[in-house]
């Protein structure tokens, strides 16, 4: 009998496993792919504050670059610089990053089973039966970190994040850009009405270029953008996936003992589609609540913390709704205000890439 079975070996699942193992709980991770970190689909831009909150120490082999600000590009062709004048975000290689999390989890005592796909989960009283291609397992609790699609969550509890929140995304690794490596670039253009195009530098030569949209011609539009913005660049790799830009699932499903985390629960910043940090923080809080209950303590403080983080994500989704209701010609006014001297000074001092709503309003941050 496994005390906590974690389905999915991405960051949310691995952080859950690390936290459970650190608290002396028997935990096993079921990862369908043969290797943790494959396939690598994420842009990998993570806040330095967020990495500290997740307590990811030790080797930084996953670190590709560090950036200090962003450049916003509008349909009019204008550029707006937001410079924090200090390192604020890391560009990471997600395969190495995920493998670092797996290593930390195993050192803490977690068991990671790769190449094992959980096909179905059955509730048997207060236990779960996990049906896989190899053998069946039993567990007291399930942490569902299966990622986009929430297949097992739908089958087991009939729940899932908003279907309309998912956007197809395509990303290229390119060689031969001519931009400084300490700024990311965001392009708000008519060709990508649902999201934005981006450039994330890896070093002086390599970078990640991508865009998300429901447009059926996304690949063609992205190729046109690439040729226009980076005419000398050569594509080294192409990946496609989906990102979530809707509201998170409001129910932790704690009473069912089947707790979804990460993309499976929509634990993602709707403004950027990034879920590693906030999804990780929620995963840690919810796993702590489970572990505390298993050891006879009160899960309440950890559930309250998780609720605060969840409320932040909901508010960030409202920010996204507001942003994409603004006509493109008015983005020049928006980014002009955002990058004014006073706004830049405030954001450099108090801005937070993860707790975006709280930091914009100057409120105390909701995270750990």
Image (tube, helix red, strand yellow):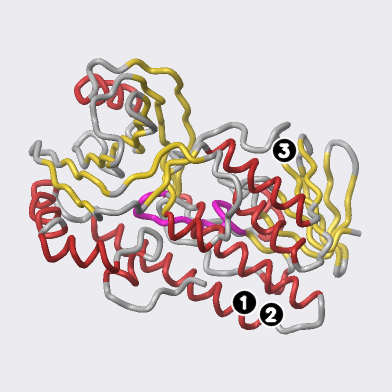
**Mark 2 Cα-neighbour bin, 10 Å: few <14, some 14–19, many ≥20:** some
Judge whether residue 164 is colored magenta.
no
Q: Which residue is mark 1?
A: 302
Mark 2 secondary-structure assignment? loop
Residues at discs 1 and 3 in contact (Cβ within 8 Å): no
Residues at discs 2 and 1 in contact (Cβ within 8 Å): yes
Residue at 62 percent of width and 37 percent of height: 37
Quarter of the rendering occupied by the N terminus = bottom right
For the residues marked 2 and 1, what is the alpha-carbon distance in whole angstroms? 6 Å
Quadrant of the image occupied by residue 237? top left
Q: Which residue is mark 2?
A: 299
Q: Which residue is mark 3?
A: 32
Q: Position of residue 84 (x, y in %)?
A: 25, 55
Tell which tag, 2 or 3, sits nearer the viewer. 2
Residue at 48 percent of width and 50 percent of height: 163
235 horizontally vs 328: left or right: right
Mark 1 secondary-structure assignment? helix
Q: Which residues are drawn in magenta? A: 261-273
For the residues marked 1 and 3, what is the alpha-carbon distance in whole angstroms? 29 Å
Tell which tag, 1 or 3, sits nearer the viewer. 1
| In this view, 114 is above or below 68 | above
For the residues marked 2 and 3, what is the alpha-carbon distance in whole angstroms? 30 Å
Residue 45 visible in the snapshot: yes
Q: Position of residue 341 (x, y in %)?
A: 11, 61
């Amino acid at each position: 009998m496994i005390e906590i079975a974690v389905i999915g070996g991405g960051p949310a699942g691995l952080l859950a496993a690390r936290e459970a193992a650190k608290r002396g709980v028997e935990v096993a991770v079921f990862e369908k792919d043969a290797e943790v970190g494959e396939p690598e689909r994420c842009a990998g831009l993570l806040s330095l504050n967020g990495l500290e909150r997740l307590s990811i120490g030790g080797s930084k082999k996953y670190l590709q670059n560090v950036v200090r600000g962003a450049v916003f590009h509008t349909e009019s062709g204008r550029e707006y610089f937001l410079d924090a004048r200090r390192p604020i975000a890391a560009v990471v290689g997600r395969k190495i990053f995920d493998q670092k999390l797996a290593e930390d989890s195993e050192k803490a005592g977690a068991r990671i089973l790769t190449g094992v796909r959980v096909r179905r989960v059955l509730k048997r009283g207060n236990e779960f039966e996990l049906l896989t291609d190899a053998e069946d397992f039993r567990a007291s609790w399930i942490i569902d970190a299966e990622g986009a699609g929430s297949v097992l969550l739908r089958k087991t509890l009939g729940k899932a994040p908003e279907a309309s929140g998912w956007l197809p995304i395509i990303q290229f690794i390119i060689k031969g850009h001519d931009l400084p490596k300490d700024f990311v670039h965001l392009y708000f253009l008519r060709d990508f009405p649902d999201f934005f195009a981006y450039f994330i530098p890896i070093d002086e030569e390599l970078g990640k270029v991508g865009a998300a949209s429901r447009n059926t011609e996304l690949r063609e539009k992205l190729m046109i953008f690439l040729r226009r913005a980076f005419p000398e660049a050569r594509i080294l790799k192409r990946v496609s996936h989906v990102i979530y830009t809707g509201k998170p699932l409001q129910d932790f499903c704690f009473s069912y003992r089947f707790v979804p985390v990460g993309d499976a629960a929509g634990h993602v910043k709707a403004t950027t589609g990034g879920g590693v940090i906030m999804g990780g923080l929620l995963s840690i809080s919810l796993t702590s609540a489970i572990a505390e209950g298993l050891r006879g303590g009160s899960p309440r403080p950890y559930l309250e913390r998780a609720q605060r983080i969840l409320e932040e994500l909901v508010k960030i989704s409202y920010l996204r709704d507001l942003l994409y209701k603004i006509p493109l010609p008015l983005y020049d006014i928006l980014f002009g205000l955002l990058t004014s001297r006073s706004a830049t000074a405030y954001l450099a001092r108090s801005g937070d890439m993860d707790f975006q709503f709280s930091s914009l309003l100057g409120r105390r941050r909701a995270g750990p």
